[in-house]
Amino acid sequence: MKKIFFTIAIIFSIFSIFSIFQFFKNSYFNQYYIISKSEYTDKAYASWLGQIIGNIYGLPHECQYIDEPRPENFGIMFYQDYYLNRMKDIGGSFSDDDTDIEYMYLLQMEKHGIEPSYSELVDAWKYHVRDRVWLANRAAIGAMRIGLTPPLTGSKNKNPHWFQIDPQLVNEIWAVTSPGMTNYACGKSAWAAKITNDDWGIEPTIHYAAMYSSAFFEKDIKKLISIGLDHIPENGVFYNTVKEVINIFNKYPDIEDWKKARKELSDKFYFNEPETTKTMWNANLNGACGILALLYGDGDFIKTLDIAAGLGFDADNQTATMSGLLGIINGTDGLPENLLYPFKENTWDKPFNDFYKNVSRYDLPDIKISKMVEMTVDQAEKIIVSNGGEIYEDEGQVFYKISKESNFNPKLEISFEPNPIFQKGTSFKYKLFTSHDNNDLEWDIYNQELPEGVVFENGTFSGIPEVTGNFKIGVYLRRDNQEVFKEINLTIFEKNIALEADKIVSYISKTDTLTRDKMWITVGKKIFSNDVSIINDGKYLGDNSVFYSINDSNKSFIDYYGYEWDNPKLIGNIVFRTGSMEENGGWFKNIEIEYINDKGDWIKLNDGFSISPEFDNSNSALNKSHFVNYLIHFSPINTEGIRITGYAGGGDHWHELSKNSYFTSITELEIYPPLKN
């Protein structure tokens, strides 16, 4: 009997020890991922190759299929002759906006460390990005060039393209360099997406980041899509979109029915999209196409690539991003050899001849793809170790132990726009933006008093100013062991004299809507007012807030906006608030001030004036920012009329509907008396 009890006790002890061992083993593996350096390197390499394949294959499909999908079905799995010849001439692959910003970001990590600041990335954008950007990216670089920093460069108030596709095609690098660190990858990608976008416009980027980071350890497409859903706002715009795409796919699971699925998708997310955000480049719409392509491809590279191209809209972005994801899942062995070595008379001994030619960004060096991968691995190792992971050797092989519980905490920064302008006796609220979303921030005013009637709390100035003048306010922001300081210049004027104008003067009083509606318009048309009368209605944003001086001219002309009064007014300041810009026009090439003299004639202001921020006198769309407040100051004049004038900007454009277009864009023109201090 004792032997039986003794035997049971031993078995129980062994079982207990085994259970404890299993508990700690499971706990360990729940906390960490393990991957060999060789496997990670291969997957990172395949990610770059996959994106290059998808980008070059997808380019001829970009924005080609809008009302209907690609007419052909499947099997056209080769590069278009134009791009094939380009690769032959180059002797390898070439850059485009689906990979070049990521390469630029990789260089910034090399230069500044694994977590570069917004200001460091802005410097890179301003130096390297000089053309070949559109929509939210172009709006962001324009904002940077007049002094804005992220997240304001992507905010709804400053970037009318905040909802477009841009961030989901330039931010994959943050997830590729943080394998298995899904929270970290999503946080970093969301932070970077705010350089160009806002609100639900960043949600597809976060979803993609979750899939990319997790794909180093998870191959199942549906599980990856589900992981992505876990990292975006539940019942948010893209969350509900992904759910609906899954429902559509389940309704038409046979790949031969992909066009039926595409019709339901486009009806819901394009044709019935609210007018304000209805464009072929909408982030939500194109994100939906990416998810549908993944579902039909089910891990197969060629099927996914072909479906992504066929679904249309901004197709090359889906082909690049989804191909990069499948590169991570399947490694280099899963990439089609004929797309890595596309020439029958092949003389390349490595994919794309191991060469990436920069053709799209100023002064980015050409590079071997293998070197790009080496840099990616180097940054990933630093990120893994700095976030609680380890690099170790076992039986002569290097492994990464990766902490799953890592989180991204960006450098502390304050973002604000030039010339915040307010009026005496008028209630206002002006918020400073930061690089952090959370609320554990401490704000202070530095050693000075605020203007009477103005208070500062939790990063927001508000109140009813009781005085006028220019006020330089020093602001401190603290979080944990970080502290930053910014000096904010608040300008408080008397009442806006434009509200009392007896007449609005303008070269164009009503938009030629027939001409406008034939143009390549990139913003939702509800933003437009077709009558110049809105320039003194006090409305800066939203529906019916922007006037385009479009006429049927295909040449530049002298445009102007201003006011006349029955009695003379003493004037010393003008605030010109620009509207949204188009790629083919919307700006003044130059600005002059004219006023009515004692004889009743319009004459130029001879004493000169200052304008802040500095006005760009070129005709470059890239240097013209949306929704800028230009503060124009001059020696006081007494006059019955004043206006801003200059040549309307624009010109030739790549799109045939928008060639030789010239016009200006405006939301408000405010007129103020001289400041008393």
Image (spheres, grey):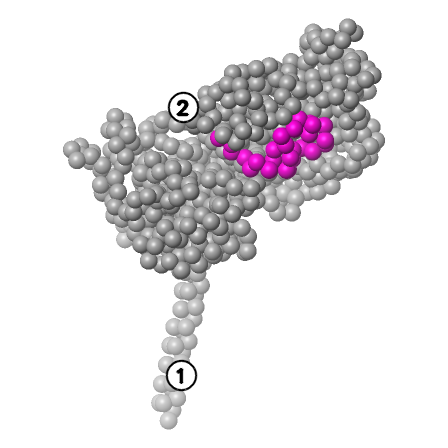
Q: Residue at x 61, y 47 (%)?
A: 438
Q: Relative to residue 589, is residue 609 drawn left or right?
A: right
- State left or right for residue 326 relative to residue 30: left
Which amino acid does the dot numbered 2 rest on? Answer: Asp
Q: Residue at x 35, y 38 (%)?
A: 61
Tell whether position 487 is magenta.
no
Q: Secondary structure at mark 2?
A: loop
Residue 442: where, in percent of width, then height? 68, 42
Residue at (38, 72) in percent of width and height = 18
Q: Is residue 77 above or below residue 491?
A: below
Kindly identify which numbered label has been placed on residue 356: none
Answer yes or no: is residue 128 visible: no
Residue placed under numbered mark 1 in the picture: 9
* Frontmost residue, 315 versus 340: 315
Spatial CA span between label 1 and label 2: 74 Å
Membership of 534 in magenta stretch: yes
Task: Classify 10 Å Cα crowding around label 2: few (below 14), some (14-19), many (20 and above).
Answer: few
In the image, residue 260 lies at what x, y percent? 38, 53
Q: Residue at x 30, y 44 (%)?
A: 72
On screen, residue 275 versus residue 458, left or right, reads left
What percent of the width, then of the height, locates residue 491? 74, 26
Q: Earlier in the sequence, mark 1 or mark 2?
A: 1
Secondary element at image label 1: helix
| Residue 61 visible to an observer of this rendering | yes
Tag 1: amino acid:
Ala
Query: Which quadrant is home to the C terminus?
Result: top right
Q: Which residue is mark 2?
A: 363
Q: Position of residue 406 (x, y in %)?
A: 49, 51
In this view, the residue farthest toward the left is: 345
